[in-house]
Image (cartoon, rainbow, N blue to C red):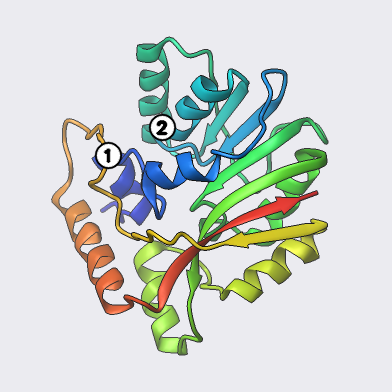
Amino acid sequence: MKKFTYTDMIAHLGVSSAHPGGSALTKKTFSNENILPDMKVLDIGCGTGQTASFLAKKFQCEVIAIDVHDTMLAKAKKRFDKTGLDIKVIKANAEKLPFTDEIFDYIVAESVIVFTNSDLSLGEMYRVLKKSGKLISIEMTAEDKLTISEKKEITEVYGIKKVLLEEEWKEHFLNTGFSEVIIERDHEANNNQLAADKNDPSEYIDPKLFEILQAHTEVLQKFSGRLGYRIYRCIK
């Protein structure tokens, strides 16, 4: 019997903005970025393609969208075809990016790194960024120290390996090689954006996926005020 994951749940529910803060935070995060039409942007863990679509429309730049989940990729392609956007979609793993060195001006990773082996994925992101390029990442962040059992509860629900404090994330980025890490809080913070945007659910959704959704909701309620997120702008 297939064991479903949190990622399976958001894929089959077709959640447009599963990352903390949702599409409103994405738009706010990029409102002051000067992305030019001749720049190349990589959206890692593109999901159903909402952020990639937004970036391509707003900046008229080249966007490449990657994900490892077939359902996500299919829904992203459907979105791009429907809107007529020329966005390349590639099935790829953040831990082994299929690109040569230093070719992207920007990398976007919204609630992605925490789901990977971050030593590998961050190293790959750094590798494919141009000098002075920027990684913009929105990641789950603990607001205070959690006990071992609390961390275990969170990691089991989301299928992640660790839950980091803000200073631990910063150290991780700097140790990867990034020269500067600018950290921002979202003052209109809202962790649970799963139903906030227009979604694209699959025709059949296994009932077990709703159990994962319920577990997600319970974790957010239980750790309200202790489990948040940050926007990390990392400059190579």
219 is higher (above) or lower (below) than 187? below
Horizontal and vertical percent position of residue 38: 72, 18
84 is higher (above) or lower (below) than 39? above
Callout 2: helix, strand or loop? helix
137 is higher (above) or lower (below) than 97? below
Q: Residue at x 51, y 63 (%)?
A: 185
Task: From the image, tell me which residue sits under label 2.
Answer: 50
Q: Residue at x 60, y 40 (%)?
A: 32
Name the residue at the top extreme: 84
Q: Earlier in the sequence, mark 1 or mark 2?
A: 2
Under mark 1, the amino acid is: Asp
Residue 77 is marked as none
Whether residues under marks 1 and 2 lie with C-beta atoms below 8 angstroms apart, the answer is: yes
> Distance between the Cα atoms at labels 1 and 2?
10 Å
Relative to residue 209, is residue 132 drawn left or right? Answer: right
Residue 197 is marked as 1
Relative to residue 206, is residue 168 drawn left or right? Answer: right
Q: Nearer the viewer, residue 109 or 69?
A: 109
